[in-house]
Amino acid sequence: MVIDKIKKREEPEEDKKYSKPDIPVGKWIKCEKCKEILYKEIVRENYSVCPNCGNHFRLSSRRRIAQIIDEGTFEEFKLNIETVNPLGMDSYIKKMETIREKTGIDEAVKCGTGNINGEKVVICVMDGNFLMGSMGSVVGEKITYSIEKAIELKLPLIIFSVSGGARMQEGIISLMQMAKTSAAIAKLDEAGLLYISVLTDPTYGGVTASFASLGDIILAEPHAMIGFAGRRVIEQTIKQELPEEFQTSEFLLEHGFIDKVVERKDMKDTIHKLLLLNK
């Protein structure tokens, strides 16, 4: 049959060589706001901020510490604390093990001491890559310990918050961390020490309702979403439509909830100036 003699035309060897673009895997990142495809190294050099639209990408605790703390000065608090499983959920322990292996971090917050342009501070940086920065017993204990160390060492306290709220897998134990951290902040205030709270995208739930909102000075990154409950829950509760910019850091600044919205590239210098003013 004639059809059997018809062969698919093959591309010349030269055309085959260039038929597919040679794009290195993992070198590009998409901005969720402007949808631009960006070279990852350029974004990193720009403090993980989109050079096209100014969108602030979410940071790991390691990257945040590298941007804020002077190189070589961060000393992490080594606390031998095990995560509790009060509800006896096997899936919770397995999930924790998987996340630890994937992220290389033990919990949703890193705490320690370090210098900011030569000024020594106690710093806590939450990490949204670990169960969305949820606050369980270990997170609450680490932050409380850090507050107590700030009092002991007579140092200013800086906390960078990013969280989806309390960790539901730990039930009432996670909710107790709100009271514990708030009580510790009250002791810090009695000691006359400065506490700067920095809110990043997103900061919600029990974290917002406790230590994140108790700073002497509250800063936030641009366009960060900050609140207690989500927009839909609030609209269903109050039966009203909320403004488009509701719960953004700019909206909260306008309504007196925070003191200043600070670009990421200016964050270290801004905190340093506040530390000097407090001396």
Image (cartoon, rainbow, N blue to C red):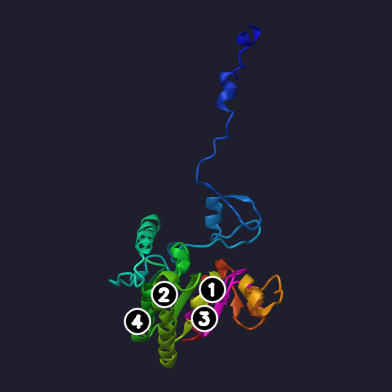
Can residue 121 be seen here? The reply is no
Looking at the rendered structure, the secondary structure element under dot 1 is loop
Disc ID at residue 140: none
Q: Amino acid at mark 3?
A: Ala
Which mark is first along the chain, 1 or 3? 1
- Please, what is the three-letter code of the amino acid marked with disc 4? Lys
Residue reaching furthest to the bottom: 190
Which sits earlier in the primary sequence, circle 4 or circle 1? 4
Cα–Cα span, label 4 and label 1: 26 Å
Is there a contact, CB below 8 Å, between mark 1 and mark 2?
Answer: no
Number of marks present in the image shown: 4
In the picture of the structure, the residue carrying the numbered disc 2 is 171
- Disc 3 target residue: 209
Image depth: mark 1 or mark 2 in front: 2
Marked residue nearer the N-terminal end (1 or 2): 2
Label 4 crowd (10 A; few <14 / some 14-19 / many >=20): some
Q: Quadrant of residue 88?
A: bottom left
* Lower position in the chain sequence, tag 2 or tag 3: 2
Q: Are the residues at dot 2 and dot 3 in contact (C-beta closer than 8 Å)?
A: no
Could you tell me residue 194's position as x and y percent? Answer: 46, 85
Residue 204 — which label? 1
Tell me what residue is drawn at x 44 percent, y 79 percent: 175
Q: Earlier in the sequence, mark 2 or mark 4?
A: 4
The kind of residue on which mark 1 rests is Tyr
**Could you tell me which secondary element the residue under label 2 belongs to?**
helix
Residue farthest to the top, as pictured? 1
Residue 112 position in % (x across, y down): 37, 73
Residue occupied by mark 4: 149
Q: Residue at x 63, y 74 (%)?
A: 247
Mark 4 vs mark 1: in front: 1
Q: Nearer the viewer, residue 101 or 47?
A: 101
